[in-house]
Amino acid sequence: MDAAPTTFAELPLDPRLGVPVPFACSSPQDLDKRRVTQCALSRVCGVCGAGLGRPIAFLGTAREEARNAFHFPPTHEACATALLAAYDGVGEGVLGQDEAVEAWVLVTTAAFEFVRPGREDLDRRPTFQPTVVLSR
């Protein structure tokens, strides 16, 4: 099992980009599939690794919001806000996104579904689908 949860301030910094590496990532660019699943099944924050309460926040692109299917795991609202501030101005794909994100979306919810891809799905990454959106 992975290391104990940490605070946002204690997250390791990526030497190239100088940004914190969230719990669910192997690098600022790449999601760690094992940790993404751990976040879903154990209900822990994708940023700090600590247990989640409510509300739950999801961050992603406008396209992910429109599909109601986010790739980055659930987070505490404060962790999501801090992470977005830390990644502001990074001009490349990060947090599981293939390309730089011009404007991030932050959605809060009380619950979510963890959906694993089927054999026919071209995108082999699991998604998190908020059941009832509380705020955008």
Image: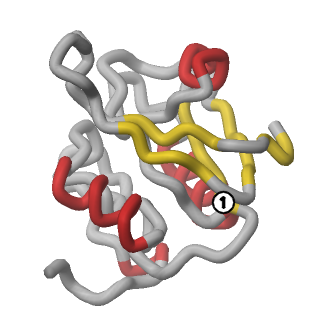
Direction from residue 55 to residue 89 in the image, left or right: left
Horizontal and vertical percent position of residue 123: 26, 17
Q: Work out whether residue 45 or residue 92 is closer to the camera in this orientation and state it.
A: 45
Query: Which residue, as the protein is rendered here, is positioned at the far right?
Result: 135
Residue labelled with disc 1: 56
Horizontal and vertical percent position of residue 124: 21, 25
- Disc count in the image? 1
| Quadrant showing the C terminus | top right
6 up-or-down from 16: above or below: below
Direction from residue 89 to residue 37 in the image, left or right: left
- Residue at image point 39% right, 84% down: 6
Q: Work out whether residue 70 or residue 90 is closer to the camera in this orientation and state it.
A: 70
Direction from residue 73 to residue 68 in the image, left or right: right
Q: How is the image coloured?
A: secondary structure
Horizontal and vertical percent position of residue 80: 59, 55
| Quadrant showing the N terminus | bottom left
45 up-or-down from 104: above or below: below
User: Quick one: SS at disc 1?
Assistant: strand
Sort mark 1 into few (<14), some (14-19) or many (20+) by Cα contacts within 10 Å: many
**In the rendered structure, which amino acid carries the disc numbered 1?**
Ile
- Residue at image point 27% right, 69% down: 12
- Residue at image point 36% right, 84% down: 5
Query: Which residue, as the protein is rendered here, is positioned at the far bottom?
Result: 4
- Residue at image point 40% right, 23% down: 91
